[in-house]
Amino acid sequence: MKTQECSQTEELIYGIISKNSDATGKSRITREKLSKLSGISDLDAISDYTSKLQKKGLITKSAFYINGAKHITYFINKTSEDFLWVANAVFDDGPELIGFLLKFAQLRYKNTNWIGLGNSKIIKEMHVGHSQFYTKIELLIKRGFVEKIDNGYILNEEYFPVTDNYVRPTAVEAILAMPDNATAKKIFLNYYNPDLGIFKNLKMSPSAFTDWCLSGCPGLKQKKTKEKIPEIDYKF
């Protein structure tokens, strides 16, 4: 996601829609569910926020009808290659903090998890009051989302994975749909956590690794281990 100019509430709504979308970016989450997850009881306010997101080019809304009743499909628009990757676990926290966290995380430097700004600059960029900022930043630190360092803040990579490559969701789905005994799937799951949607301990870009697995792991050198997971030759 990349939503630098959104309010905290818009960040929250966008994040919930994103979390409840499929690999193509389509979501049919209802206003009632958006209301429940966001803590915003006014359904008309939900519609207003999604309309604002559409005006900003972040989503597209499309109406469809079932038995005369109107429903909405949301499509997440790809607006940038500078993505903020967010693990689903972020949304397990309270809605009052999620919007602030997502907006704060947008201030990271390029595709890193480092926010190299002083508090005064962050407050100005986020358009929040001093009291609100210091109260919520302490909560973020306490809950393990953020770490304070001498020259700014570090986002916890468990919640905000760092990657310099966009991985196509359809490619991931294709690999996960392979038989459990498929070599490519075994190798892929050795480095990819499907529950969190993140890669760990890779020696190549996630995009290149995913494409390699999808193509059947060409150039793979087999080596028997107790876990029967082949050794990867990274020089292909």
Image (tube, rainbow, N blue to C red):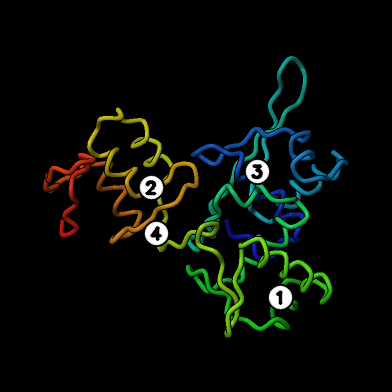
According to the picture, the residue beneath numbered tag 3 turns out to be: 17
Q: Quadrant of residue 214?
A: top left
Q: Position of residue 178 (x, y in %)?
A: 31, 30
According to the picture, the residue beneath numbered tag 4 turns out to be: 165
Q: Residues within 10 Å of mark 2 (few under 14, many from 20)?
A: many
Q: Position of residue 139 (x, y in %)?
A: 72, 64
According to the picture, the residue beneath numbered tag 2 turns out to be: 192
Q: Give me the C-alpha separation between circle 4 and circle 1.
A: 26 Å
Kindly check if marks 4 and 1 are in contact, taking CB atoms under 8 A apart as contact.
no
Mark 1: secondary structure: helix
**In the image: residue 63, left or right of residue 218:** right
Q: Position of residue 64 (x, y in %)?
A: 68, 26
Kindly check if marks 2 and 4 are in contact, taking CB atoms under 8 A apart as contact.
no
Q: Where the C terminus falls, by quadrant?
A: bottom left
Q: Residues within 10 Å of mark 4 (few under 14, many from 20)?
A: some
Extreme-front residue of the structure: 226
Mark 2 vs mark 3: in front: 2
Mark before the other along the chain sequence, 3 or 4: 3
Q: Give me the C-alpha separation between circle 1 and circle 2.
A: 34 Å
Mark 4: secondary structure: loop
Q: Amino acid at mark 3?
A: Ile
Q: Amino acid at mark 2?
A: Tyr
